[in-house]
Amino acid sequence: MGVSSSLYSGVSGLNANGNAMSVIGNNIANANTIGFKSSRTIFGDLLSSQISGSGGTSQVGRGVGLSTVDNIFSQGTFENTESNTDLAIEGSGMFIVSDPAGGNSVNSYTRAGAFRFDENGYLVTPEGFNVMGFQLDASGKTFGDLTPIWANTQSFTAAGPTANLTLTTNIDSDSLAIPTGFDITDPSGSSHYATSIRVFDSLGSTHLMTTYFTKTANNAWEYNSVIDGGEVLGGTAGTLELVGEGILGFDASGNLDLAASGNGIPLSAPGTFTTTPGTLDWANGSVQTQVLTMDMQTTQYASPSVVVSQEQDGFGTGTLVKLNVDETGNIIGNFSNGTPRKIMQLALAKFTNSGGLTKSGNNVWDESDNSGPPTVGTVGSGVGNIFTNALELSNVDLAQEFVKMITTQRGFSANSKTITTTDEMLAEVINMKR
């Protein structure tokens, strides 16, 4: 009995080391799998049998068994990529994905962030799983339950009416004064310089507003802003309507003198004027109470009048042209009018015992009793950080795996020797009868 039991000890060693080699082989096979987490085998000795001897009762081992296969969730290194929807997690968090074929009723988890938007606007994995996240309210805060991240690729963004504009100009101090001032029926003949800019109303329509500068005395100018009368209620097309006017005073150095400047309305900031309230009563049905704040970054130097720059903050309606993900997990829609908009926010999950998750293939894991329930949150809430244009590589250490392969091979060979040697010993017992 003692000799033959060593056969079974050797067989248990072959089985255990064979399984260990399978784990090593799987690790090596997935050395280039993004987000892959390596595994390791833990052996345990089997129940020992008791034998009696002159020194008392002793125990003899019965071999080895596979105790468990641990999943190693150490951080993998990052690879930079060209795609903004490639995401890598720093920390213990995991992306939440769900199979649309099952109605997104069960969530799975992955560290592989090679995502893309499909033809329907869903953010998906290469295997077609939906990536889960939260909807955002008007203030950008999450609400509701987890839902597949989706963007309406046919959506529009509303227009933004112009509220502020900046005119950075120089007006020539050598211009001859026109004491009688500006004549709206002859704007070019009663001014020294003009600049035009297009402004937006609440519907996204544009209107051309022209500002004329007229020198009335040394260091004293007036400006007059006009639009075509056909664009406002009660106006006549081809006839100019005055929408803003004011005085620009300059000091002896050619800089704007605030004490000598104004337009009848107190200046809200240095060089800031406004259009006359009620004059921008657009005829197309847009908001009638629009008022433009005009920042006159104006100088008066002995140099030809010139526009250095002009800016305004309005924009028209736009269609969705591109989707991106930022480093806080927000899904950003970039529209044709140049305005970005947050659409949804990516969700992350972490587990008390990540090692207890169950592998289900396709780079995803499933919750189990050993893992415990997930803690779900967003980037910055303690579940991990993400990096865009990056992927987490496999955490397999090839050098370590090859060392394990050598020791496992040695263990397998040694156990096979146990079996062949035991066989020889049994043969000797059988030969005793001859």
Image (tube, grey):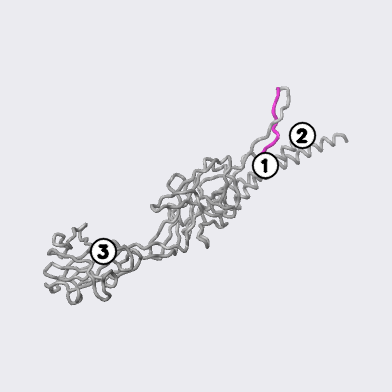
Eye-nearest disc, 2 or 1: 1
Residue 396 appears in view: no
Give the structural element (helix, strand or loop) at label 1.
helix
On whether residue 164 falls in the magenta region, the answer is: no
The residue identified by callout 1 is 16
Magenta span covers which residues?
A: 56-65
Q: Position of residue 335 (x, y in %)?
A: 41, 63
- Disc 3 on helix, strand or loop? strand
Which residue sits furthest front?
234
The residue at which mark 3 appears reads as: 166
Mark 1 is surrounded, within 10 Å at the Cα level, by few (under 14), some (14 to 19) or many (20 or more) other residues, namely many
| Residue 57: numbered disc | none
Tell me the distance, in whole angstroms, between the alpha carbons under discs 3 and 1: 77 Å
- Residue 208 point in image, percent of width and height: 29, 71
Judge by depth and name the residue closer to the eye, 399 or 91. 91
How far apart marks 3 and 2 lie (CA) works out to: 97 Å
Q: Amino acid at mark 1?
A: Ala
Q: Quadrant of the C terminus?
A: top right
Task: Count neighbours of disc 3 (C-alpha within 10 A) and say few if under 14, some if 14 to 19, many if 20 or more.
Answer: some
> Closer to us: mark 3 or mark 1?
3
